[in-house]
Amino acid sequence: MKIKNINLLLLSIFAVFVVRFLLSFLPSFGFDMGSWLGWASRLSALGFSKFYSDISWTQYTPGYLYWLWLIGKLGWINEFAIKVPVIVADIAVGVLIWSLVRKVNQKLALASFFIYTLNPVVIFDGSVWGQIDGLLTLFLYLSAVFLIEKKNFALSVLFWSIAFLIKPQSIAVLPAILIAVILRKFKFKQVLFGGAVGALAIFGLSWPFFTNNPILGLPQQILKMGNFYSYTSVNAFNIWSWVGLWKADSTIFAGLTFSVWGAIFLVSSIAFALYLFRNKLDSKASYYLLFAILSLCFFVFPTKVHERYLFPFFAFLLTSASLFKSYNLFYIYGITTLSSFINLYYPYAYYNDNFLKSEILYKISGGLSKLIGFIFAAAYFALLFWKKLPKLNFKKLPARNPDVYKLPKVSLTSKTSNVILAGILIFAFTSRVLFLSNPQKEYFDEVYHAFTAKTMLHDGPKAWEWWNTPPEGFAYEWTHPPFAKEVMVVGMVIFGENSFGYRAPAALLGTGVVLLVYLIAKQLLKDELLALFSAAVISLDGLTLVMSRIGMNDIYFLFFALLAFYLFLKEKYFFSALALGFAAASKWTVFWTIPILGVAFLALRKKFKFSLLWFLIIPVAVYLVSYIPMFLYKEHTIETFIEVQKQMWWYHTNLKATHGYSSPWYTWPFLIRPVWQYTSGQVNNMVANIYAMGNPAVFWLGLVSVAVATFYAARERNRRLGIIIFSYLAFFVPWAASPRIMFMYHYLPSIPFLAIATGYVLRRFPKTIVYFLVPSALLFIYFYPHWTGIKVPVWLDNSYYWLDSWK
């Protein structure tokens, strides 16, 4: 094994641990965490033999209780004593997966490590919820490894026995161990010795808790636990979600109770799986897949199942997918991960009223229960017959579809192109800085952002504190990360504490957005003239102009998100991660940049490079560094930082405010409801207004261009054009799930990609150029006062309201 690979693994382990540890500060599942901590105190005070009680709720097997006893004795009774060992166990499983897959492919092994340890289900269950399924999975996985890889039956049974004592649902994979006795031809002595080891482990570790009833104590405890939840489903989105969650499983159907039907479904599904795999278990990858299927069966078919019973499934399925190098298995892994994560969120949100709870997300997750139950049932059959499914391997697509239309060559010298680009940038810069200081006082959300930047400038700790009462008409802006406001401070230091000072950085970045549209279009679609058209289109847009002239954080996020995307395309991953960090430190909307980068990576078939690991470290570091000014005040601690993040989440997920100029997301592309940001009032039949609205020609003709580009991207399988369409949609369609009020300017991040799609159409159909650019330029001149607060006669102002919804 190369030293380089070990060093990369160690760096990866460290990075994952840091990420998981930071996430462990998020609020736990209150009831479960309270039980762990309470049991630790109880064990420390009463010991093992007096732990179980009919008075106190003690519905757990002895395995994990040893750790609770230890932390109780050491005085470590806190949430980190619960979460950190689970994080370590999850990482250990990831390392085991890496050790198996590296024999097949080193890069795939490291990727598999991250795919498991940063799986949202694994993170949420251990780092957030505070459950111990990671420990259960570690011992089950060790049992499988010693059975499949080492052929050591005794150690396999020993680890399974420990897993069984942690959680009895370990019986899910017992058929795989038993069938190994038959098919792997273990000698009778090995089987006898292994059985004795398992029996002694279970008896020896449970005996201290049942000294008065050492033989029947554990079985009675397990029966007691099983009878405690006599329901169809205890929040598990399995087939019983079709009947309904928390329905009595003693209900009679066709002469049998639901619980009996569940047992029949479980036994039948296991038997069917074993029958299909009877001739396939000479393959190690197939054996891990069998472990995964058995884990899935135990979640999908019986009654009384909790939402977390599926947890061990992911480690086994990922191992099999990696060893088989199967795209189909990876897709099933991804779909079931998303489904399980939604399932986990539902009970967490129901029982926990904290900043992670969103009523709309809670309702959506509950509403998906029947669909997800169907998905898990379908996953069972898909895994059984995965080799017969259509092969979804994008690497088998041709490098370039021969039907992709090749844009005609245009004679355009580098000098001419540079002159045109310079002209577009000069125009964009001039239009953004002209009359930038008007109005001279804060307007619209500048009363939050710019006002808070001024507070920062004067060393005001109140800028970071959500509990303070601001002056009338203003508010301290803590609902977004601080980077944009900190840059405004720099602007005021350079240009003075005035409106120009806190708006100037936005104007510069707004000009940079135009340049980045040019660079992205050129890099992705490989055409100079197309890139120039794209830059021209966005330079003529009104919404981009308005948001480049105001002291808010939107243009900051957009600039750095586009910069991260461009550098990602150039494979400058360190600097791309740095830019992504600045975007994250400006606005949480950065979340939607991540799938864009992922889709671009897959669509462009980029090779995995270890420099991609910077994305796990740099953005988090930049985000934390942006809060350094907050920590300069001694009264601000890490607890203050954590609480600020909680307050931000609470604000955006529970905001019930209304606003006359709010609008639903699906109206934005049609320019239905602009946002009235400022008015001077009528004086001598003159008035100045600022409306955050797009150029009608850019918006409406651009929307047609998006549709046309989508058609050709699909028809010609043009992956590069498809990335543009995906990026356009990714930045505004997710707002459909937002619980808070929305505004037209939330559409801003999609406009650069609308501009590139428009540039493509103009380049492909040259006859449309004049019909697009001329109206767009004329409307830009016409609406410019309406976007920038220049005083105009009332009659001209009245002409701007083409639709009643524009007033």
Image (cartoon, rainbow, N blue to C red):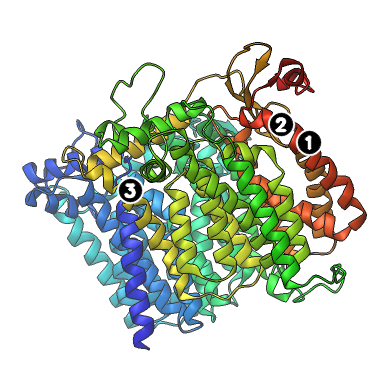
Q: Amino acid at mark 1?
A: Leu
Give the distance between the C-alpha atoms of the residues marked 1 and 3, in whole angstroms.
59 Å
- Side (left or right) of 577 relative to 129: right
Q: Tell me the quarter of the picture where residue 256 sits.
A: top right
Q: Amino acid at mark 3?
A: Gln
Q: Nearer the viewer, residue 506 or 24?
A: 506
Disc 2, SS? helix
Residue 120 percent location from the top left of the image: 46, 53
Residue 801 percent location from the top left of the image: 76, 21
Q: Nearer the viewer, residue 651 or 181?
A: 651
Q: Circle 3: is it few (<14), some (14-19), or many (20+) Cα within 10 Å?
A: many
- Side (left or right) of 486 relative to 313: left
Give the distance between the C-alpha atoms of the residues marked 3 and 2, in whole angstroms.
42 Å
Residue 611 percent location from the top left of the image: 45, 73
**Residue beneath the point at 77% across and 61% down:** 530
Q: Nearer the viewer, residue 410 or 648?
A: 410
Reading the chain from its start, which is encountered first: label 3 or label 2? Answer: 3
Q: Residue beneath label 1, please?
A: 779
Q: Tell me the quarter of the picture where residue 413 sits.
A: bottom right
Q: Residue beneath label 2, please?
A: 667
Q: Nearer the viewer, mark 1 or mark 3?
A: 1
**Residue beneath the point at 60% across and 42% down:** 432
Q: Residue beneath label 3, please?
A: 131
**Residue beneath the point at 49% across and 47% down:** 341
